[in-house]
Structure formats: C-alpha cells, structure tokens
Amino acid sequence: MARTLLGTPVVLWRADDGRLLAARDRCPHRWAQLSKGTVTGGRLVCPYHGWQFGPDGAVVEIPQLEEGATLPPACLQLLPATEALGMAWISLEPQPLAPVPAIAEFEDTSFDRIEVGVIRYRTSAAAIIDNNTDSTHIAFVHSGSFGADQDPQVEVGSVERTSFGISISYPEMPIARTPTSQQPGTRWSVTEMWLPFVQVGRMHYSDGSTHILVKGCCPVDDDVTDVHLAVLRNDLAGTADRQTIIDFELAVELEDKAVLETLPAAFPLDPRLQTHTRHDRPGIAYRHALSEFLADLS
Ligand code: FES
Ligand SMILES: [Fe+2]
C-alpha cells in the first residue's frame, strides 16, 4: 500500500506474522517505488529487479545472484508503524512525536464501530481540526444537513489544556430529537483534540446514546489532508442501517470540505492574523497548543 505523509512517500505491508511494517517508498538499488511491487511470504519484493526485503528491512534475496552469494548491505529505512483504532499510525521520526489517542470505547463491546472512510481535503490538517473546534459554522455550512434548525447563537464551548492537547466541552442543552426516542431531550459533548491532528468527539444524549466521532487527519502534504473517519455508537444494537450513517457522515464532511478548500493553504497559527469573537476561544486554544507542540520539536 502506498501512502504519503508530510510529502514523504511511504510503503506499508505486512510481515509473515501479520505485523504492520512501513518504510520510505524507495528501493535502495535504483530507487524504484516499492509500493508498486508485491509481498511474498512477508517479504517485500521490488517491482524493478526483484530484490526481496525481510521484516527488518534488510535485503534477503537478489534473484540475479547465485545461491549463497554475499549480498550488499542494502536496507530499507523502516519507520515506526502501529495499528490502533482501526487505523495505521506511522512516524517519519524514529520516535513518534505524539501518542495514538486512547479511546476506551474501542474495547467496549457495547459500542459498534462504523468505518466511514477516507475523505481527501485540499487544505491543511490544522484547518480541518480548527473547523472541528468551531460550532458557529454549523447553522451555515451544515444548513443542508444537521444544522437545519440550528440557531446561530450557540453556546460558547469551554476549553481546557490537557496532556494531549485541548478538550472542548459544551454543557447539557435541549435538542428536538434524541437518536433513539425521536423525542425532545438533551445533549452534552466533549471534543478532544489530540495534537497535532486527531479529533475524538463524544456526544452524550439523554436517552443514553453516545456517539463518538474519530477523525485522524493525515497531513499528506502542507495543503492536502486525508481525513480517516470512524464513528462509534452504543445505540445501534446491530439493527441500524450502517450505510445511512456512512452517507450522512460523508455528506457532512463534503459540506465542510466545500468551504475549507476555499481557505488559503497556509494555516495562521498566530491568532493576531484573524478576527475572533468569544466563540472562537477553542480555535485560539488550538492555535496556542499546536504552536507549543511545534516549538517543542525544534
Ligand atoms: S530498483 Fe529495486 S531491485 Fe532494482
Ligand atoms: Fe462542520
């Protein structure tokens, strides 16, 4: 599988034991793209001259050489890779700069997981997270979906810094329908932004339903982002029409995408560059948190 992370082409494959492996997508021989090759018995086989690489990245066979020949010390640049939350997590650094978010509900059998898919945005990952800190766009951007009855005068989210980034809370408020009863009820929510680019949003309804939106925003490049979207819900009881949920979530993403792709590519980390109201506090907190995260790297 080929992916691009921060402008760097990456190849992913599985070792014999099923383990996820990742490396820079370039053969050390003549720099062919390894992701165009094949996997045989857990070995990654280059499409150009058929060199084979083992799970530690070292070349283990060169078909042009006779058996027992000494092989050159060719080795792939393996990257840390792990599977969690139904997604692959890769680091271009030898040590990942941030942890994979902890989401206890992934292990909780009362929650069903729906993989919505991957949505490619032509904008920065930071702009997508910023959009998700912001509930004031809902009445406008999502007027064609869940924002139809939304009063523009929404509550201001309270925001706190956490060890992983920021957490934005909205107090319990009345809603016209709950997911299972279709009767009036209430909802409260907490959205976690795990630095740099992962959102875990939890919505709790008075009928006992909890919906969790997990968005892993993979920065393909400075201005292209793949949003890996999954939903966890405890109210499906194996009966709901999953495709309806997927279609709904995709429609919402496309509404955001249409606006976000009109923003300039460079995300403004400095809050002084834009104008804000008190509703924008979560977005400002995200800018500060991301700035500090980036400053710690240098
Ligand atoms: S370029 Fe990969 S084997 Fe030659
Ligand atoms: Fe939105």
Image: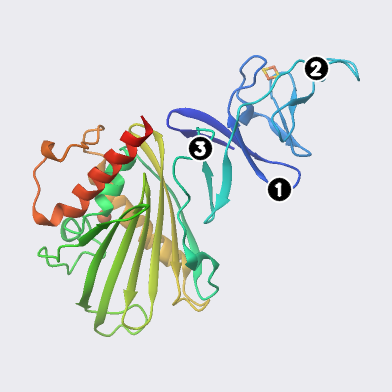
Taking the spot 60% from the left edge, 23% from the top edge, the residue there is 26
Within-10-Å neighbours for mark 3: few <14, some 14–19, many 20+: some
Which residue is situated farthest in the right direction here? 67
Q: 285 or 10, which is in the foreground?
A: 285
As measured in the structure, the alpha-carbon distance from the residue carrying label 1 to the one carrying label 3 is 19 Å
Q: Is residue 45 left or right of residue 139?
A: right
Q: Nearer the viewer, mark 1 or mark 3?
A: 3
The crowding category of the residue bearing disc 1, from other C-alpha atoms within 10 Å (few below 14, some 14 to 19, many at least 20), is: few
**Label 2, on which residue?**
71
Q: Which residue is mark 1?
A: 18
151 and 17: which one is in front?
Answer: 17
Q: Residue at label 3?
A: 91
Q: Disc 3 marks which amino acid?
A: Ser
Q: Specify the amino acid type for callout 2.
A: Leu
Task: Indicate the amino acid at tag 1.
Answer: Gly
Residue drawn at x 52%, y 45% as measured from the top left: 89
Location of the N terminus by quadrant is top right
Task: Please tell me which residue lies in front, 179 or 88.
Answer: 88
Q: Position of residue 257 (x, y in %)?
A: 29, 46
Mark before the other along the chain sequence, 1 or 3: 1
